[in-house]
């Protein structure tokens, strides 16, 4: 048995109970500290009763707390196959595929296949339903002639709320090119232009 300063005797049973109580209090305090770190780093809802749907992971920079890495409400996705029409400086129509990995492929029905009717690009999301596209087309100057034209297009695309249509604007620059250096843009464009694009999503039957 152990004797307390108050004169009360501390039996083994009381000792075990007291140590268990101290351990429980320490766990509660540690948990409160952890939640305090989470509250300082995780965005709070506008009202205490609201939830902010999000995904968090540990903050590797500080080693404590969590940071939001993706919002579950990201809006419509551009990934899929589209039928498009281009107007303005360029006149074209066809199909356009946006791939999950951030690449894009276009088949231009308004271009003679003998001069090059397939082109590609890379896209990224810049807003809730807004995307940019960096697109390159390589063409022959005439059927049967050699390669000699680099077409560089930049698009800004806005998806409709339904996610099944989009509209956008583009700027385009045409560069002379040779087989020896087919991507050379250092000499500046021969001509530039702009216009619009509109597309609807192709859906499975």
Image: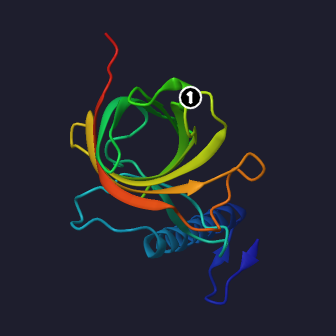
User: Does 197 sit above or below residue 130?
Assistant: above
The percent coordinates of residue 20 (x first, y second) are 63, 63
The percent coordinates of residue 23 (x first, y second) are 63, 66
Q: Quadrant of residue 140?
A: top right
* Position of residue 205 in the picture relative to residue 148 (left or right): left
User: Does 114 sit above or below residue 138?
Assistant: above
User: Does 186 sit above or below residue 93?
Assistant: below
On the rendered image, what quadrant is the C terminus found in? top left
Residue placed at 64% from the left, 86% from the top?
Answer: 7
Q: How many other residues sit within 10 Å of disc 1, few (<14), some (14-19) or many (≥20)?
A: few
Residue hosting label 1: 143
- Outermost residue toward the top in this view: 205
Closer to us: 84 or 70:
84
SS at circle 1: loop
Closer to us: 1 or 57:
57
Closer to us: 169 or 160:
169
The percent coordinates of residue 74 (x first, y second) are 36, 49
Residue placed at 62% from the left, 27% from the top?
Answer: 144
The percent coordinates of residue 164 (x first, y second) are 26, 33
Residue placed at 29% from the left, 53% from the top?
Answer: 195
Q: Tell me if I can see residue 103 in this picture.
A: no
Residue placed at 40% from the left, 26% from the top?
Answer: 109
């Amino acid at each position: 048995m152990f004797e307390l300063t108050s004169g009360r005797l501390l039996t083994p049973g009381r000792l075990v109970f007291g140590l268990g109580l101290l351990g429980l209090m320490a766990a509660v305090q540690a948990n409160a500290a952890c939640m305090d770190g989470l509250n300082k780093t995780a965005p709070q809802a506008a009202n205490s009763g609201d939830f902010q749907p999000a995904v968090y992971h540990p903050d590797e920079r500080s080693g404590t707390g969590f940071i939001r890495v993706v919002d579950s409400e990201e809006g419509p996705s551009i990934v899929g196959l589209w039928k498009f029409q281009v107007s303005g400086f360029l006149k074209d129509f066809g199909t356009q595929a946006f791939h999950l990995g951030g690449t894009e492929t276009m088949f231009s029905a308004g271009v003679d296949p003998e001069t090059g009717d397939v082109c590609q690009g890379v896209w990224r999301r810049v807003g809730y339903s807004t995307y940019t596209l960096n697109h390159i087309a390589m063409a022959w100057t005439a059927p049967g002639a050699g390669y000699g034209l680099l077409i560089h297009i930049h698009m800004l695309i806005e998806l409709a709320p339904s996610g099944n249509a989009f509209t956008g604007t583009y700027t385009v620059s045409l560069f002379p090119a040779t087989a020896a250096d087919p991507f050379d843009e250092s000499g500046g464009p021969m001509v530039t232009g702009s216009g619009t694009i509109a597309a609807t999503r192709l859906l499975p039957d």
